[in-house]
């Protein structure tokens, strides 16, 4: 078998990156442009938990082969996930494949009353850009975010000389139109199938706002308004169920004391469970079919990481086609509950480089540990801390995937930003799906095996290069 160095890459992405970096070098390093790009971010709406998002001065450039691969991976995974969700809802025996809190089961089974099973999702994966092989990291449902980071980072680079020069040589396309107006149009199309729709709905974006990307919410609310649809933003705890109506009492953005007809749920379900009593107004309105909840609580089936294990169970393989089962085999890493009943915990301790440990249901890379980051002694202690329910909540262990590296110029708001040499960072790609249609990529990079904000992870603008008509 040829070595990796002698195999021609399946994409031109690295060539595009090298070309862009050579332009940066030819322009003397672009120190002023780098400082200006970071200054834009400091003034921008790309805020995550009160902190400005760190970004890349180098966009992620993707060619048509990458676009087509992303589209196939995203839309195939969506089709599979919808089959799993439908089987869970329609087949009581299948529910035993999952280990959910009884309250979660109750929420998942609440009525939906519109067509779309999984309206909004982002599937996160590692793509080997030499081979186009894919390994999934996680599936995200209604709490998916990042669209505004991509948009603001693009704006930070719009006037940068190297990107202007690169754009003279190549046809470039962004994801912005598909991700922003595209979602508003899709949401309204889904609402149009709702059994109890009204002519002039008041839409609410709801979350627990201390966990929310509120600047992104305001952008979407204004886009709804541009379509002639009133949209407000509320904390879940500021909702009330009164006289058979869901009412937004105190708006973060929009109208106080307003009846709500449709909800875009951005709150993840485990936050609903954590704030159970404070979430009852929303839950009761859904239970009594007084509001369209887009997406439904059934999206939790996708978000919970135990789905990776369930995809390999005979009960799941029986509902998938041979092509879909082959897809799962090729893309989904081995995943198991981290307990002696499901996996050899001693072997996990002994082979740390092969594993990553995660909570079954969390977000923001909280309590995620890659064995390659630790010594043998540290890893053994981590396994003991989370195995067999020791932490008070279930954890999974998953086969670790070494991410693909791409050269980048990170912008952290540090003096070194303006002169830093290009460095190879790990890649993590989040593929957005609006009602099963691939719409864009959340491109993240980082210097550590776990790619997230707290490990100096950065976000990059996504650009399609010389791809032609993306609708063909």
Image: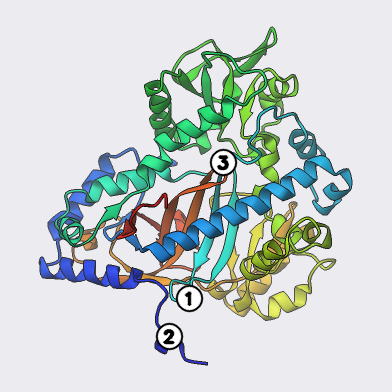
Give the residue at x 71% y 75%: 348
Residue 296 pos. (x, y %): 66, 34
Q: Is residue 187 left or right of residue 60?
A: right
For numbered disc 2, what is the local secondary structure?
A: loop
Give the residue at x 23% y 51%: 157
- Determine the CA span between mark 1 and mark 2: 9 Å
Q: Residues within 10 Å of mark 3 (few under 14, many from 20)?
A: many
Name the residue nearer the viewer: 58 or 447.
58
Q: Is residue 395 above or below residue 400?
A: above
1 and 2 marks in contact (CB < 8 Å): yes
- Location of mark 2 (residue): 7
**Any part of residue 47 in sight:** no
- Determine the CA span between mark 2 and mark 3: 37 Å
Counting residues from the N terminus, which is met first, the one under dot 2 or under dot 3? 2
Counting residues from the N terminus, which is met first, the one under dot 1 or under dot 3? 1
Residue 87 pos. (x, y %): 79, 46
- Determine the CA span between mark 1 and mark 3: 28 Å
Say which mark, if any, is on residue 324.
none
Say which mark, if any, is on residue 435.
3
Say which mark, if any, is on residue 131.
1
Give the residue at x 31% y 44%: 152
Q: Is residue 265 left or right of residue 29?
A: right
For numbered disc 3, what is the local secondary structure?
A: loop
Residue 223 found in image quarter:
top left
Q: Is residue 233 left or right of residue 358?
A: left
**Any part of residue 429 in sight:** yes
Q: Residues within 10 Å of mark 2 (few under 14, many from 20)?
A: few
Counting residues from the N terminus, which is met first, the one under dot 1 or under dot 2? 2
Residue found at the far right of this picture:
93
1 and 3 marks in contact (CB < 8 Å): no
Residue found at the far top of this picture:
243
Tell me how the rendering is colored.
rainbow
């Amino acid at each position: 078998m040829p070595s990796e160095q002698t195999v021609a890459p399946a994409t031109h992405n690295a060539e595009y990156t090298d070309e862009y970096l050579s332009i940066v070098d030819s322009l003397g390093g672009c120190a002023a442009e780098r400082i200006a790009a970071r200054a834009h971010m400091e003034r921008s709406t790309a805020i995550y938990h009160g902190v400005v998002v760190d970004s890349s001065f180098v966009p992620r450039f993707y060619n048509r082969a990458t676009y087509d691969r992303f589209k196939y991976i995203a839309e195939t995974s969506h089709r599979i996930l919808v089959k799993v969700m439908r089987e869970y809802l329609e087949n009581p025996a299948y529910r035993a494949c999952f280990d959910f809190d009884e309250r979660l089961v109750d929420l998942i089974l609440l009525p939906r009353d519109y067509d779309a099973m999984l309206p909004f999702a982002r599937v996160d994966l590692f793509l080997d850009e030499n081979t186009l092989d894919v390994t999934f990291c996680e599936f995200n449902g209604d709490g998916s975010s990042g669209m505004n980071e991509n948009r603001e980072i693009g704006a930070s680079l719009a006037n940068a000389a190297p990107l202007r020069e690169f754009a003279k040589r190549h046809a470039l396309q962004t994801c912005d139109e598909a991700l922003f107006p595209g979602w508003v149009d899709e949401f309204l199309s889904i609402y149009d199938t709702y059994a109890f729709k009204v002519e002039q709905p008041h839409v609410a974006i709801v979350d627990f706002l201390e966990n929310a990307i509120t600047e992104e919410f305001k952008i979407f609310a204004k886009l709804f308004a541009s379509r002639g649809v009133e949209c407000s933003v509320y904390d879940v705890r500021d909702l009330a169920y009164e006289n058979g109506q869901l009412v937004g009492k105190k708006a973060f953005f929009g109208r106080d004391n307003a009846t709500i007809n449709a909800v875009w749920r951005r709150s993840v379900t485990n936050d609903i469970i954590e704030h159970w009593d404070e979430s009852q107004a929303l839950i009761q309105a859904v239970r009594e079919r007084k509001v369209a909840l887009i997406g439904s609580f059934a999206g939790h089936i996708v978000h919970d990481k135990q789905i990776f294990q369930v995809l390999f169970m005979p009960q799941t393989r029986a509902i998938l086609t041979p092509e879909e089962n082959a897809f799962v085999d090729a893309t989904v890493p081995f995943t198991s509950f981290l307990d002696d009943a499901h996996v050899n915990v001693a072997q996990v301790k002994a082979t740390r480089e092969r594993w990553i440990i995660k909570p079954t249901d969390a977000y923001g890379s909280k309590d995620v540990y890659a064995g390659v980051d630790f010594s043998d002694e540290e890893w053994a202690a981590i396994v003991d801390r989370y195995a067999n329910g020791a932490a008070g909540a279930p954890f999974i262990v998953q086969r670790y995937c070494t991410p693909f590296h791409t050269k980048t110029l990170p912008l952290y708001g540090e003096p070194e930003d303006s002169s830093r040499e290009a460095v190879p960072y790990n890649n993590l790609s989040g593929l957005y799906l609006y009602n099963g249609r691939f719409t864009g990529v959340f491109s993240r990079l980082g210097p550590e095996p776990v790619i997230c904000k707290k490990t100096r992870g950065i976000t990059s603008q996504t650009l399609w290069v010389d791809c032609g008509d993306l609708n063909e």
